[in-house]
């Protein structure tokens, strides 16, 4: 049956994620306590995004989608970095540098009432080398009487300082107007490539699980730096690797191969890289090591992958180290910590020996096929009809919400819209998702079910 008319109507309100260029990246940097986080929250206007105001707390989330005057951009928050008393000048500048490298433009925040400190000077030196657009912010200018405090900041040679009160929200509009002028339309490191090129894979996992070992094993002697291949993307951070008779672009392999040389802030940096790699990829290989218990950081990375809406494959590395006892605990850890991603294909591998490395490509292909799977509207409604007949929604307060109709307006990942006569219980919604997975093969892809209540 022709369902194109329905698709036209519904596709409008469903986000389509991949294959659109990644928005440009604006990083907020500065030394601790100048008000970076306050400014970030002001800009994204999401109070719930504020993570406890405790120094040293590592935040999961490091970048946020933001919008100003109808333009989308990604805001990178460096406020979560812990300050270290020892050698702090250098540390703060080094950590800021990581964010600057990933950004298209930079907002450099100073405390307008304190003026430029030695740490600020160190940041200025670093910024000079980077040659990225910089917007200088004199924060904590809460009243016009304090405006004169801003003038000395001209001496930094970083252009006009923007007086801002992140606390009260004054001055942020002018700042964002100026920032948008400096931001390109799309991110320099981002941008989903159009259909047709090699599939894009993000290899993610916490430090030491074996990412670079696996890359080396997969790439073998024929490693090709994408940069050197004519007619392909020029971004040298990616690598073309042949697997299972097909070429794949492994994104951000430069970041994986570059060994972490900084202890402080490295987890933050790893998370930032992970998020950026996921944005640029279609499918994620989440690498875990069976050597140690599944950790909080593993679970956070899994969550990032899920949130990204990409296809996924779980790869358990260092299988050569597994003994019976460890294996027993591993299975229990998987059940406990990874139950919410039990639908992902699992491959057990050894990056060291190359054992099972040929299993990766079929798993990637399967996850991607399901990520792009579209269930025709007729089939979907036949499925819904049977499901509802056998398991009607429980009656709530004398009412029983009915599902009138369902459609799948988009893929990558599969997204369903159900038209109902009332809100469906979360439990019932989960039941529908479970049945969708059982009936159609959605292994390796998150799926989303949205509701439209029709009175
Ligand atoms: P960060 O470490 O740079 O992320 O700084 P925070 O955003 O955590 O802010 C540090 C402190 O400065 C907090 O107590 C904020 O409430 C305060 N602060 C931030 N912006 C302003 C502002 O515009 N005016 C005033 N008076 N205080 C501010
Ligand atoms: P990355 O930080 O995720 O890139 O991890 P590396 O590839 O640097 O690996 C960390 C350590 O684990 C290195 O000492 C590797 O030799 C070791 N390693 C990686 N894969 C395996 C594996 O399959 N088996 C064993 N026994 N060791 C491995």
Image (cartoon, rainbow, N blue to C red):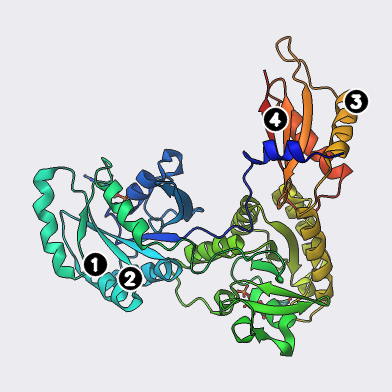
- Give the mark, 1 or 4, whose residue is nearer the N terminus: 1
Do labels 2 and 4 touch, CB within 8 Å? no
Q: CA distance from mark 3 to mark 2?
A: 62 Å
Residue under the image location 56 percent in, 64 percent down: 191
The Cα–Cα distance between marks 1 and 4, rounded to whole angstroms, is: 50 Å
In the rendered structure, the answer to whether residue 59 lies left or right of residue 160 reads: right
Residue closest to the far top: 398
Check the image and report above or below for 40 versus 247: above
Tag 4's secondary structure? helix
Task: List the residue tagged with mark 2.
Answer: 93
User: Which of the two marks, 3 or 2, is nearer to us in this view?
Assistant: 3
Mark 1 or mark 3, which has the lower sequence index?
1
Question: Which disc is residue 426 wearing?
Answer: 4
Q: Which mark is residue 390?
A: 3
Q: What separation in Å lies between label 1 and label 2 (alpha carbons)?
A: 8 Å
Q: Are marks 1 and 2 in contact (CB under 8 Å)?
A: no
Left or right, 294 with reference to 439: left
Q: Residues within 10 Å of mark 2 (few under 14, many from 20)?
A: many
């Amino acid at each position: 049956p022709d369902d194109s008319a329905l698709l036209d109507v519904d596709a409008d309100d469903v986000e389509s994620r991949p294959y659109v260029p990644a928005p440009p990246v604006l990083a907020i940097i500065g030394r601790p306590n100048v008000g970076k986080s306050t400014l970030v929250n002001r800009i994204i206007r999401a109070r719930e995004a504020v993570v406890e105001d405790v120094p040293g707390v590592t935040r999961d989330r490091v970048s946020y989608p933001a919008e100003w005057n109808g333009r989308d951009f990604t805001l990178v928050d460096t406020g979560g970095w812990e300050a270290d008393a020892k050698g702090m000048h250098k540390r703060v500048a080094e950590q800021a540098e990581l964010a600057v490298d990933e950004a298209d433009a930079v907002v450099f925040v100073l405390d307008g009432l304190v003026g430029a400190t030695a740490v600020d000077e160190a940041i200025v030196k670093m910024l000079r080398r980077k040659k990225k657009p910089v917007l200088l912010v004199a924060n904590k200018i809460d009243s016009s009487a304090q405006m004169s405090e801003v003038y000395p900041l001209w001496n930094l040679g970083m252009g006009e300082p923007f007086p801002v009160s992140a606390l009260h929200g004054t001055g942020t509009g002018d700042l964002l107007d100026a920032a948008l002028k400096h931001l390109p339309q799309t991110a320099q490191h981002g941008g989903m490539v159009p259909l047709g090129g090699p599939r894009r894979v993000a290899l993610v996992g916490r430090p030491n699980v074996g990412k670079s070992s696996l890359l080396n094993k997969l790439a073998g002697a024929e490693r090709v730096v994408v940069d050197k291949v004519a007619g392909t993307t020029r971004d040298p951070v990616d690598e073309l690797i042949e697997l299972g008779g097909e070429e794949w672009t492994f994104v951000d392999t430069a970041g994986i191969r570059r060994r972490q040389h900084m202890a402080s802030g490295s987890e933050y940096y790893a998370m930032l890289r992970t998020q950026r790699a996921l944005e640029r990829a279609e499918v994620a290989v989440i690498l875990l090591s069976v050597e140690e218990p599944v950790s909080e950081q593993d679970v956070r990375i899994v969550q990032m992958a899920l949130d990204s809406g990409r296809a996924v494959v779980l790869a358990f590395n260092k299988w050569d180290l597994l003994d019976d006892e460890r294996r027993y605990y591993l299975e229990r850890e998987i059940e406990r910590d990874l139950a919410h991603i039990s639908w992902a294909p699992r491959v057990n591998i050894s990056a060291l020996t190359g054992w099972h490395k040929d299993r990766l490509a079929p798993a990637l292909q399967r996850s991607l096929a399901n990520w792009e799977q579209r269930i025709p509207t007729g089939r979907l409604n036949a499925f819904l009809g049977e499901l509802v007949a056998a398991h009607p929604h429980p009656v709530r307060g004398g009412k029983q919400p009915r599902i009138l109709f369902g459609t799948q307006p988009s893929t990558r990942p599969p997204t369903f819209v159900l038209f109902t006569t009332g809100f469906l219980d979360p439990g019932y919604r989960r039941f529908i998702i479970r049945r969708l997975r059982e009936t159609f093969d959605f292994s390796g892809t998150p799926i989303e079910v949205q509701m439209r209540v029709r009175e």
